[in-house]
Structure formats: structure tokens, C-alpha cells
Amino acid sequence: MQTIIFPTDFSKGAEKAMEFAVEISRKTNAKIIALNAYDLPYAETIMTHSLLDVMKKNAEDAMKNVADALAEKGISYETLIQMGNPIRVVKEAVEEHHADMVVLGTKGASGLEEVLIGSNAAAILHNVDCPVLSIPSGKEFTEINHIVYGSDFRSKKSDKALTELATIAKLFDAKISVAHVVVNYELDEKTTAEAKARISPILGDVAHDYHIIHADNVEEGILEFAAKNGADMVALMSRNYSFFEGLFRRSTSSKIAFHASIPYLALQETR
């Protein structure tokens, strides 16, 4: 791992997310790129341009505090401030810097608020081609000892995601519980056996086990299993949507990101 993108809005939640980015940087010697995007629609009038100047100055002042905090940690970092839609700015930064991971803070929400407030985080999960680690607001850094990975035993599009998962687990020497949630259907033994035969060689020497969970929906099943078993992180393979689909579609991975009380790792499927 060489580069971590850390999008920040300078909130308390972002500060907590930075702790996780710093710990991963320490374990991998990766450089952190602290990124802030500011934007104002319809920037056409003199008044609006003046406001954008103020926003830029405020961002520069706040980013200096972020830079000072990262410098104190003794890790490699750089800062980047850009005007533009946060989703596009993050996506472009990931591509330009060949980032290995995005670490960001999320704010829990529900209903309409989940769609409006959470659209940036949800769209980032679905529109970058690297793992995205989202940290619930206020979550203090703790070592990651147990990861619950929500897997679809019937899908064969998970090699890239599993490889990424194994890499993260090895950083923390964490155990992985591979969990398939059954909702209103039965999973036959052949499918389960084939899934284990496909998954285990990719996870290799990472400690792992398998679980079949019966629940009303995937989101609740994964989160309840994680809570019961004292997991430190939940991981799921994220679907790749187009930019506009990512804004408005609420997949299971997005819902878990909003509702998880522990760090959530969104892994990318093979395109």
C-alpha cells in the first residue's frame, strides 16, 4: 500500500477517521493525501465568487491544522484543496494518485436524510476503484481483531474483493468471519462447499471461518451478527454504479455504511 486518500470536511468525525488513516499509514508506510473539496452551485455572480474566495480561505486555514496534526504523527503526507463536487474530486484524486484506499468519516442517518446527507459518502463507495474504509462519527481508533465479511456464496465475482480483504486483515492480524445471509430461500450444501473452495485459497493463511445467517434482510443480518460476535469491522463487496446511480441508489453496502457502529470496509468487485 502506497497512497491513502483522506477526504476531510474538518469535522470531528473526520478527525476520528484520520486516526484510522494514520494507523494504516504506520503499518504500511503509505502516504496520506488529506483532501478537501469545496463547491457552490451556480457560481456566476460577483457575490457568489466572493463567497467562494471565503470558502477557499477557510479551507486553507483548516487544512493547515490537519497538516500540523499529520506532521506530529511523523508520517508521509500531503494536502490538497480543490473546488468542485466532492464525489468527482475524490474519484479523480484516487485515479490520479493511484490510491490504494480511501478513509473517510460518515454520519449516520435514516430515511430521506440518509439520501440527502449521505449521498456523497454513498457515491464515493460506489465510484472509486479501491477499498473505502468509512468510520462512524465519533468512533475512537481500536485495533482490528475480527472482521465480518458479508459474502454472497452464489457469486463468483469476488476475487479482487477477497484479495483486498486479505491484505487488510493481515495488516491487523485479524480473523475473518465469512457470512452469507439467507433471506427467504434455502442455500444448498453444494453451493456452500463450492464457495468455501473458492474463497479459502484467496484468503490463504488468514484465519477465517464460515457462517450462514438467516435474517429478514442482509443489512440487519450482517450488523446483528457482527454485534453478537464482537466484530471490530464489517466488510462487504460494493457494487460499481455510474456516477448518477451512485447518488440515488441505496445498496446494502450503502445502508451498512450509514448504520454500522463500527468501521465499514467497502471492497470493489471486478469490473
Image (cartoon, rainbow, N blue to C red):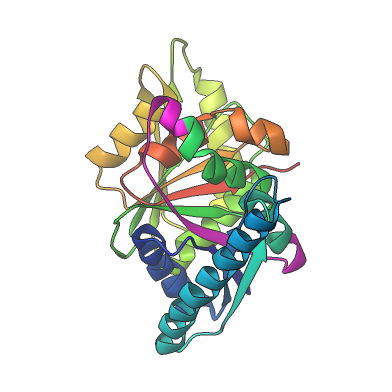
Residue 231 located within the stretch drawn in magenta? no
Q: Residue at x 63, y 56 (%)?
A: 47
Quadrant hosting residue 81: bottom right
- Does the image show residue 128? yes
Figure check: 88 above or below 255: below
Q: Residue at x 66, y 65 (%)?
A: 82
Q: Residue at x 29, y 56 (%)?
A: 138
Q: Nearer the viewer, residue 13 or 221?
A: 13
Q: Position of residue 115 (x, y in %)?
A: 50, 31
| Residue lying at the far top of the rendered structure | 184
Query: Magenta residues, as a range?
Result: 95-114
Count the labels in the image.
0
Q: Position of residue 101 (x, y in %)?
A: 59, 61
Residue 98 located within the stretch drawn in magenta? yes
Q: Nearer the viewer, residue 109 or 231?
A: 109
Quadrant of the rendering where the N terminus is positioned: bottom right
Quadrant hosting residue 131: bottom right
As drawn, is 180 to the left or to the right of 246? Answer: left
Q: Nearer the viewer, residue 46 or 32?
A: 46
Q: Position of residue 141 (x, y in %)?
A: 31, 65
Quadrant of the rendering where the C terminus is positioned: top right
Q: Position of residue 153 (x, y in %)?
A: 55, 30
Figure check: 201 above or below 112: below
- Does the image show residue 5? no
| Residue lying at the far front of the rendered structure | 46
